[in-house]
Image (cartoon, helix red, strand yellow):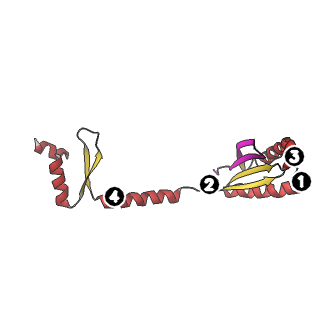
């Protein structure tokens, strides 16, 4: 009986433990719910080291999302608008997300329609460089819109 199982690589737990001890390695339970439970003979410290190394490499490859902000007033002048639009274009070309917002001071909240028109104008003019992630939305005294850069093909 034991001879048949050995050919398949299946050992009773005591034999597996002694076999691992002979080799100076660890017996690690991989799948405890399986019938019979699945174990593997490995150097556990080396396994943990390699796992940490893999996680660190994955973390280094992960892209970090940069969000740049551009602030407008509800009655921003054309020259200021063009200047800020040029910066927004540069940010999107660099691959950063853009948060454009109109800040309403005091009673200027009555011009919220002008703020929305301003943000929609910005979105339409930056259509070649990025796409709108969130349409203009009023939150307190701010009307915010998010733009994400277009992916390069």
Residue 50 in the image: state x and y as whole percent.
Answer: 37, 60
User: From the viewer's perspective, is the residue at label 2 or at label 3 nearer?
Assistant: 3
Foreground label between 3 and 4: 3
Residue at left offset 71%, top offset 52%: 98
Query: Is 136 colored magenta in this rendering?
Result: yes
- Side (left or right) of 78 relative to 61: right
Task: Give yes or no for residue 149 being in the magenta stretch.
Answer: yes
Q: Disc 2 marks which residue?
A: 65
From mark 2 to mark 3, how far is it between C-alphas?
35 Å
Q: Kindly report the distance in space between the C-alpha atoms of the residues bearing marks 2 and 1.
A: 31 Å
N-term-proximal mark, 3 vs 1: 1
For label 1, the crowd category at 10 Å Cα-Cα, with few meaning under 14, some 14 to 19 and many 20 or more, is few
Q: Residues within 10 Å of mark 4 (few under 14, many from 20)?
A: few
Q: CA distance from mark 1 to mark 4?
A: 62 Å
- Residue ID for mark 4: 47
User: Mark 2 vs mark 4: which is more N-terminal?
Assistant: 4
Disc 1 secondary structure class: loop
Q: Earlier in the sequence, mark 2 or mark 3?
A: 2
Q: Residue at label 1?
A: 77
What stretch of residues is rendered in magenta? 131-153
Q: Earlier in the sequence, mark 3 or mark 4?
A: 4
Residue 146: percent from left, percent from top: 71, 47
- Occupied quadrant, residue 20: bottom left
Question: Closer to the observer: label 3 or label 1?
Answer: 3
Q: Which residue is the site of mark 3?
A: 107
């Amino acid at each position: 009986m034991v001879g048949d199982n050995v050919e398949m690589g299946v050992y009773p737990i005591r034999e597996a433990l002694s076999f691992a001890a002979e080799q100076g390695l660890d017996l690690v339970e991989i799948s405890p719910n399986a019938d019979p439970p699945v174990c593997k003979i490995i150097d556990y410290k080396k396994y943990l080291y390699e796992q940490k190394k893999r996680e660190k490499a994955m973390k280094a490859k992960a892209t970090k999302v940069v969000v740049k902000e551009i602030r407008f007033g509800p009655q921003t002048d054309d020259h200021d608008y063009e200047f800020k639009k040029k910066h927004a274009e540069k940010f999107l070309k660099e691959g950063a997300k853009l948060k454009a917002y109109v800040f309403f001071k005091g009673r200027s909240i009555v011009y919220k329609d002008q703020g929305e028109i301003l943000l929609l104008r910005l979105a339409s003019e930056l259509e070649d460089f990025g796409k709108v992630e969130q349409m203009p939305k009023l939150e307190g005294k701010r009307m915010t819109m998010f733009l994400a850069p277009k992916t390069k093909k």
